[in-house]
Amino acid sequence: MKVDFEINGRAVHVETPPMTRLAHVLRRQLDLEGTKIGCDAGDCGACTVLVDGRQTCACLMPVAHVRGRRVVTVEGLASLPFGKRLQRRFLDIGAAQCGICTPGMLMAAVELLSGNPSPDEAEVEAALGGVLCRCTGYRKIIEAVTDMAVDAAPSAGNASCRPAVGARIARLDGPDKVTGQAQFGADGWPDDCLELRLVRAPHHAATFELGDVEAWRLLHPGVDRILLAGDIPGRNAFGIYPEIKDQPVLADGLVRHRGEPVAAIIGEPQAIRALDLAGFPVIWCETKPVLGLDATLVFDRPAIHAQTPDNVLARGRLATGDVSQSLAAAAVTVRHTVETSFVEHAYIEPEAGYARRIGDRIEIVATTQAPYMDRTEVAAVLGIAPERVRIVPTACGGGFGSKIDVSLQPIIAVAAWLTGRPVGCVYDRPESISSTTKRHPARITATAGADADGRLLAMRFHGDFDTGAYASWGPTVATRVPVHASGPYRIGAAHCTTTALYSNGTPAGAFRGFGVPQAAIVHEALMDELADGLGIDRLDFRLINALRDGDRTASGQLLGSGTGLVACLERLKPRWQAEKAGLRREEGDLRRGIGVACMWYGIGNTALTNPSAMDVGIDSSGRLTLYNGAVDIGQGSATVMVQICADALRLPVEAFCQVAGDTDRTRDAGKTSASRQTFVSGNAARLAGLDLRGRILRLANAGEEASLKLAEGHILVDDGGRKTRIDLTRMKSDATGDVLKGQGFWDPPTEPLDENGQGVPYASYGFAAQMARVAVDTGLGTVTVERMWAAHDVGRAINPTLCEGQIDGGIAQGLGLALMEEYLPGRNENLHDYLIPTIGDIPPIEIFLVEEGDPLGPDGAKGLGEPALAATAPAIFGAIHDAVGVRPDKVPLTPDRLLQRMQRVRRMRSG
Ligand code: FES
């Protein structure tokens, strides 16, 4: 069918079946890849475009419906009357993080602003409610759209300001994100790219036999090849730990979770997309699955892996002091048990990328959080040396931990290796959800005691964590949680244990906190209960016990300066007191309450080496390049690293360009996880800058305080009035084109933990305190979070706008964890059944950045990604308890569960 319409002001004519959806026509036929596809089902809104001025989900609209109509995509936004200003607002305010939702957000905002140039917050929420964002927590998006007339802070977008550290510099990768030019995993594939689809298990546990696969292939023209387990050239297994490679690339006769791949079908894109995989020749023999913590904990459960007959993947332990004696001596003891659920990362960009073979090397261009780890795994799967693998990260449309694990990288590498053609793959939303890692469900029981003066004496804690079918980051969760289990408090005695258990659930791995958010729900409930039991204000109780400079943690680690928890609580205290005094507790069926919660988070790997390496070079024209392997997944490392390096060099940010995360061109900066990039890679970037500055000063025989200035082909050095001109054009360049290079390497100092969890697990800790005010509808069981306050010890805010963005986004994910998010394998593998917070769910958030300075951090900075989330759910649960007197025994606390809890408590109280 021929369809004529207008796209971004020009007439176009496409020939395509009439039901082809507009989003696919835009991306595949018109090369307009600024329109993103997040779910292909009208749930996420990433594909929002304007059709005759109205926002429309392009993934739902058949192209026949736009015949004769005007379509505007993000590529045409700048030509609209206020388009550029809206893009600038998004940049200046920090409304784009990973940027995958940004085109859709911008187009939805355009429709609103066209009829209403000064919308209020409610109007923005209504207009943008169809577009999901998993990164920003929506607050900065609302701010960007509510008053287009307001200019941003003076330094916003100013990359020339010095010092750069502390400035609200607009993110350096932002312009591509607000114009639709940023390339994510599904974008920019070679024209001759084949496509790959995976045949996945429909059962949680099964054995299987394959039929005549070749005969099936011959029945499907355009299908070039089908890969099975036996086709993997190297090791048919991958995993995070060197000694645990338990997850097959393609299953071999046995599947351990629903969604596990058993075959890969490769062919021409049209043919692959048209396949009906229901007829693929495989005979399943379903077996009884081990699902849920109840099943994982029964004695005679079947072994998920033969080599682990008890299904115990890992255990963690911390022990200090005499817990029994301390609890016996306590004036008050309290106990709490809670169970949490699988939580889906729900990044808007599903797994995507392509691979191509270049001679005896393989190149993978894909979305990832960990390029060097991807390189190692792909090399082993292909059976080649890591140096023959190149990983080129695309823009990452959200990761939050799941994209540390490889997903499609090994199989597209095998496909490209064996076919000799580029091969691409995009997971659809159900397979993204069913096959990639989740937050660990946990069942935790803990007891704590305090003396009559409110001093925390002891805690006993045990947590069982369902790690699903494969190990992924399960051992990390098991070891990290005991360190954090007693909370950021002085404590004399603690006994904290964990178990990570295999099941037939979806593999659980890293998700913003590695188990610490689940533990925080419990230790903060205990702090509330102890405070209540002693008649001490809940915030004051935390102040009494908060870790301070010079204290020892439960791991026996001596804390140096920069322990900012007390400062966080002090910043919240006036708000706490005002809310307590002025809270309108009852209003019809509504009951209001306030809650406060603290958290701490060890930055980087637990008691393991954790290095980062960075280079910065200058070429003969005077252009600086930061070779930055710290992948920016939306948090802002592409900006922060340059700010830090620029100040070390004492040159402006605008003098830099950047190579981001290409394993052929950057050294290993480690994975983007555990809130480590600012702290660890920031130090590497600082040292690289200092190294290059030192080389320049030595060439000029200048002192430490000399100033530098870049000019075309020269560096001008001014040493107290003595001026030296370094001619770069006469210097020999290296393979990268640089004539001078500075190198930085930093590994945070830690010490191993002994069998009692004693040692120095982390070089730095982030601290935070958050407050929540909620209104509980006692008739419906619904909870509205009306306002949040967040005080975070960031050490030093390298870029306050980016810090605020992390906190807003972490709170949004924490709210989802608390009240709505529960992934049930096989039941809600899409974004209309699996609910994440929308723009209307996130309340106003007041943020306090506490900058006490970490002695080891670059310019004093600590990590923030995980700390942003961990205190939110416990603060909300504290507020709910304050309102209606109940706490969850199962998280999320959905309306039905809350009503049941309230009824149960009512029955107990009435006898
Ligand atoms: Fe919205 Fe990442 S910035 S999903």
Image: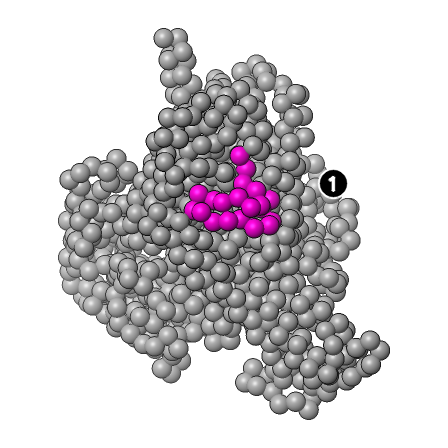
* Secondary element at tag 1: loop
Is residue 670 visible from the viewing direction of this image?
Answer: yes
- Quarter the C terminus occupies: top left
Q: In this rendered view, identify the residue nearer to me: 542 or 114.
A: 542
Q: Residue drawn 50% across and 55% down? A: 763
Q: Residue drawn 53% across and 44% down? A: 551
What is the span of residues highlighted in magenta in the rendered image?
A: 545-564
Name the chief secondary structure element in magenta: loop
Residue 906 placement (x, y as % from top left): 41, 13
> Is residue 142 rendered magenta in the image?
no
Three-letter residue code for mark 1: Ser
Say which residue label 1 marks. 118
Is residue 96 visible from the viewing direction of this image?
Answer: no
Residue 747 placement (x, y as % from top left): 49, 64
Q: Residue drawn 69% across and 65% down? A: 647
Q: Residue drawn 72% across and 73% down? A: 704
Q: In this rendered view, identify the residue nearer to me: 571 or 402.
A: 571
Instruction: Characterize the local packing of mark 1: few (<14), some (14-19) or many (20 or more) Cα atoms within 10 angstroms.
Output: some
Residue 837 placement (x, y as % from top left): 51, 39
Q: How many marks?
A: 1
